[in-house]
Amino acid sequence: MEEVKIGVYVCWCGTNIAKMVDVEEVAKEIGKYPNVVIARDYKYMCSDPGQELIINDIKKLGLNRVVVSACSPRIHELTFRKALEKAGLNPYLFEMANIREQDSWVHTDRVEATRKAKDLVRAALHKVLFHEPLSERTVEINPATLVIGGGIAGMSAALEIAGAGKKVYLVEKMESLGGMMARLDLTFPGLESARDNLQLTVARVMKDPNIEVYTNTVIRDIFGYVGNFECIISPNFKEDISLQFGNVVVATGLKTFDPSVIPEYKYGQLPDIYTSHEFEGMLTSGRIVRKDGRPPENVAIIHCVGSRNRNYHEYCSRVCCMTALKYANQLRSALPEANIFEIYADMRAMGKGCEELYSLSSRRKIMFLMFDQQGPLPVIRKAGSRDKCDYLITLQEKLSGQDIEVPADMVILMVGTEAREDAKEVAHQVGISMCGNAFFIEKHPKLDPVATTTNGVYIVGSCQGPKDIPDSISQARAAAARILGTIAQGSVTVEVTTANVNEELCCGCQTCIKVCPYTAISFKEEEKVSFVNEILCKGCGTCGSACPTGAITCRHFTDRQLINQIEGLMRMDVEPELKEV
């Protein structure tokens, strides 16, 4: 038996950890524990010099276990696993303790935070004693790709992949391609024709021999795993077709908020109150007129309708402010004598050229009035017979602190955006998660913004959250690059910390099948036991915790490992069972 030799590394993370945790004291105390050969603290463990410390110690001191106490494993666990691999050590003989998000960032008492850091590192130390080497698995990649959604994001991804000579199946639920962009007149901030740009993109897609387009088509089912997916689609909602592919791009977009639920705005109750998308149609037709055919003399544009409000949606819909400025400029050009009012909560002019459009708009005799989005909303009511307008909008103007009335003959409601009604169905089909607002969740918001926790499934565009056209296209191209990279490799590494069923203990209750979020478990009818597809399994542990007989073991998170980790966390005076491996 080989003696266990553990290296422990405590990260300062600049001041992120060191400000609240005495990292030197943590390393000093942990260094006294049995089997700990070296315990170091370093300012940035994830940096190249920090990784080199680990690599050199493994080689010089013969380390066969490593514990790094730093940030969340979601951020840098893979970084340190690769460092172990580079040093010739199995990457799964590693454990990470989170003393940043779970300690220094959530505490104000330095003494207690330091004590907690010691507990967390000691828990990791106890667990890593029982880690076992795991071997990576790879699967071959089918070079075809399925793109779900024919908006600008979906088409951009399809064109990038097809441009590399790879097959793409583009499936769109509606009768034509274009998505939300097809409803736009001009784009911001340059006020360019959305229709012209979109038509060029659609034409490229339709002409590309590597793109097979299915419009008016629904997806019945998707099954398989990265590299080897299959789905059943129904073109025109009636002829079933089977498609095989290696990766999936989800680009299903979003929908607009229905403002009729906001009583202050009287949408659907009074004429000449339009949503922003209804007004787009008016701009496309070239006629800006009221219901009676007369041009408006007073136009009010109300921002944040359904967005950034705790009663509706608390998030920002991203594009509304700039679209409202676009409208104001189009109105000023079409109706030079009209009074134009921008009634806004905050002006969010993010993006290249957007602040410049805001400045330009402020010089075109457009009145900007601010209200508190969390306070009383502006209220629209019919004007009296003596008023020279159709409506009066009452609001508490935030900058002046006064209650004012704004005249209007036409009101444009800048409606927010929200997830589509079928988002949950799509998420279930492709095996991905949704946030509280029903947008799809990426693997990591900073380090992996287009991938998901399901290997081979990528999310792009506004199905992930509200975003503008350039951001949607950028995401689409990023996902396409990731997919082309895996296709070029020919194979991809899949998760190995998966679940395993002990058939002798399995009672056949199928509880694990019901709770598995990745549909990775099936039932063997003849043997009456459950079976885990280890390619589909993500090692989340849900099945193991739900199994009533303890028949399911999760690799890398065995009962023995977890119990020992708990003992270490509770500072129990228990000598670790394993001193040799």
Image (cartoon, grey):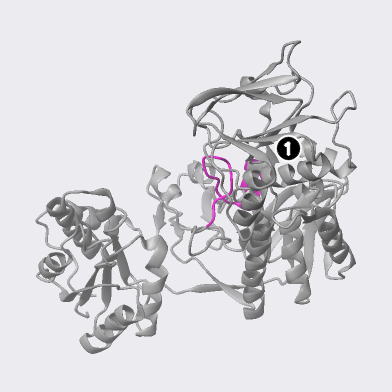
Considering the image in quadrants, where does the C terminus appear? bottom left
In percent of width and height, residue 437 lies at 55, 40
In percent of width and height, residue 520 lies at 56, 54
Give the magenta-colored segment's residue range: 424-442
For residue 289, side relative to residue 163 (left or right): right
Residue found 73% across the figure and 70% down from its top: 160
| Residue position for label 1 | 276
Question: Would you place residue 563 above or below residue 342 in this image?
Answer: below
For residue 441, side relative to residue 82 (left or right): right
Farthest residue, direction bottom:
60
Considering the image in quadrants, where does the N terminus appear? bottom left
Residue 431 lies in the magenta-colored region: yes
Q: Tell me if I can see residue 71 in this picture.
A: yes
For residue 428, side relative to residue 47 (left or right): right
Figure quadrant of residue 73: bottom left
Question: Would you place residue 287 above or below residue 329 in this image?
Answer: above
Local packing at callout 1 (Cα closer than 10 Å; few below 14, some 14-19, many 20+) is many
Dominant secondary structure, magenta: loop
Q: Tell me if I can see residue 467 in this picture.
A: no
Question: Would you place residue 203 above or below residue 286 in this image?
Answer: below
Residue found 28% across the figure and 55% down from its top: 562
Q: Nearer the viewer, residue 240 or 521?
A: 240
Residue 252 lies in the magenta-colored region: no
Q: Nearer the viewer, residue 446 or 82?
A: 446
Residue found 77% across the figure and 74% down from its top: 163
In percent of width and height, residue 530 lies at 52, 50
For residue 561, side relative to residue 260 (left or right): left
Label 1, secondary structure: give it: helix
In percent of width and height, residue 36 lies at 16, 73
Farthest residue, direction top:
385
Amino acid type, residue under disc 1 in the picture: Ser
Q: Nearer the viewer, residue 331 or 577?
A: 331
